Image: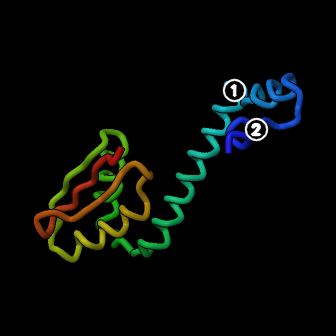
Amino acid sequence: MNKWLNWKPDCSNSKLAEMEKDELSENEAMCYKNIKNQSVKEASLNARKILSPDVHIPDKDLRIVYELYRTAVIEGSALYQCNDEEQAKLWEQHFKRNLPTDRWACVIRENEINILTTS
């Protein structure tokens, strides 16, 4: 049993040291981290587009929707009381599909749309 615990490969010590030293440079590590984060963001966006269907926003509401989107992106959150529950749910679907990955939308108190920062 002790033979297994003390086993070492037949490589020279310099070869082992070289293998252990084979680490990413700081710049390479940052590049890998950026690529990894980017693919997580892309996956999140793709999932949102699949889970939240594209909805048609009436022309009369587009200005308000644009202002809410702009406010949410710049300030981090927005709250708006819609005309009715149906409008709130429609806008929620629109925002869930189109907001940046660190923002989320939900309906509160039946007819209010709440856009918030998640991270």
Q: CA distance from mark 1 to mark 2?
A: 36 Å
Q: Is residue 72 left or right of residue 31?
A: left
The image shows residue 85, relative to residue 7, as above or below, that is below
Residue 27 — which label?
1
How many numbered circles does the render carry?
A: 2
Quadrant of the snapshot with the N terminus:
top right
Q: Secondary structure at mark 2?
A: loop
Q: Which residue is mark 2?
A: 7
Could you say which is closer to the camera, residue 118 or residue 70? 118
Q: Is residue 60 left or right of residue 46?
A: left
Q: Is residue 22 left or right of residue 60?
A: right
Q: Three-letter amino acid code at disc 1?
A: Asn
Quadrant in the rendering for residue 43: bottom right
Sequence-wise, the earlier of marks 1 and 2 is 2
Could you say which is closer to the camera, residue 64 or residue 10? 10
Quadrant in the rendering for residue 93: bottom left
Nearer mark to the viewer, of 1 and 2: 2
Horizontal and vertical percent position of residue 63: 32, 58
Instruction: Give me the residue at 42% from left, 64% from top.
Output: 97
Instruction: Give me the residue at 36% from left, 51% from top.
Output: 103
The image shows residue 55, relative to residue 72, as above or below, that is below
Horizontal and vertical percent position of residue 95: 36, 61
Quadrant of the snapshot with the C terminus:
top left
Residue neighbourhood size for the residue with mark 1, other residues' Cα within 10 Å, grouped as few (<14), some (14–19), many (≥20): few
Horizontal and vertical percent position of residue 104: 33, 56
Q: Residue furthest front?
A: 1
Instruction: Give me the residue at 56% from left, 45% from top.
Output: 37
Residue neighbourhood size for the residue with mark 2, other residues' Cα within 10 Å, grouped as few (<14), some (14–19), many (≥20): few
Q: Three-letter amino acid code at disc 2?
A: Trp
The image shows residue 61, relative to residue 118, as above or below, that is below
